[in-house]
Amino acid sequence: MGEPVHKHRSASGGYSMIELLVVVGMVGIVALITVPAVVQLMPQYRIRSAASETAAAVRMIRQQAIAQRTPWRIEFDLKNNRYRYWRLNNPGADLSVEANWTLMSRNPRWAAKTTDPEWIQIAAVQLAATANSFQDVVCPITPSEPKVDMIFLRDGSVSDQGQCTVSPPATPLVFSPEPEIKFAVDSNAVQFNRYYVSLTENGTVHVRATKE
């Protein structure tokens, strides 16, 4: 006798309605958990990144001032949330005179700029001055375009020179408490909606986070 014939029945793929409903329910639960977390994380990531990247840029400019034995400055445009780099033409030149500064390109090129302003934009974060903020040191000062300057001297310390057009001259920058720049996002969903980048007199950079 020949071997018995086995009929192979192909299993028809598919899910029952109950299985589909279970999967849909699980997806919905995961979405309820993850979507609010993502909504919270994005503004938090943006403000933390902006403050950290700016602090790194400040440290880099300080190192340039020390390496080249020439003052360097970071100019912050508070209205448009951006900043750029300058180098003093002569180590002994007046820090408050605009013509004494040369606009520099971004690292790693470090070339003088004549046409491109080379602003570094800070996206989705608002820059602001604080009660003890840095001052707009370099003339001319335009009230409608608020700016502040971080100036590193040739030894890496921070210049305490006051605002140049005030009469009588502005009080020199003080370092207790440390002068700072504020980074803000308008969101109550984040753990920290304010970051502060500050400097000590010798040029040490601090980053502080808070909820306000």
Image (cartoon, grey):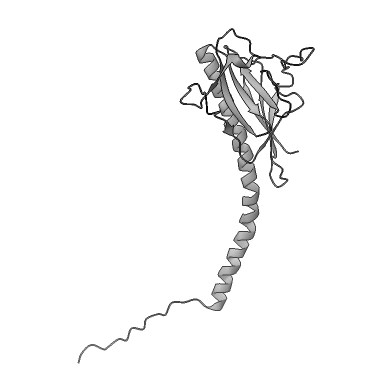
Residue extending farthest right:
168
Q: Residue at x 65, y 38 (%)?
A: 125
Q: Nearer the viewer, residue 90 or 183?
A: 90
- Is residue 14 shown above or below 142? below
Residue extending farthest top:
92
Give the quadrant of residue 130: top right
**Residue 186 drawn at (x, y percent):** 72, 43
**Residue 107 drawn at (x, y percent):** 49, 26
Give the side of residue 2 with respect to residue 120, left or right. left
Q: Nearer the viewer, residue 112 or 34?
A: 112
Quadrant of the drawing holding the N terminus: bottom left
Give the quadrant of residue 98: top right
**Residue 182 drawn at (x, y percent):** 69, 31
Residue extending farthest front:
115
Number of marks in the rendered image: 0
- Is residue 100 shown above or below 85? above
Residue extending farthest bottom:
1
Q: Nearer the viewer, residue 98 or 75?
A: 98
Q: Residue at x 61, y 42 (%)?
A: 45
Q: Residue at x 57, y 30 (%)?
A: 119
Give the side of residue 163 with respect to residue 72, left or right. right
- Is residue 88 shown above or below 188? above
Quadrant of the drawing holding the C terminus: top right
Q: Nearer the viewer, residue 90 or 42?
A: 90
**Residue 183 drawn at (x, y percent):** 67, 34
- Is residue 124 shown above or below 137? below
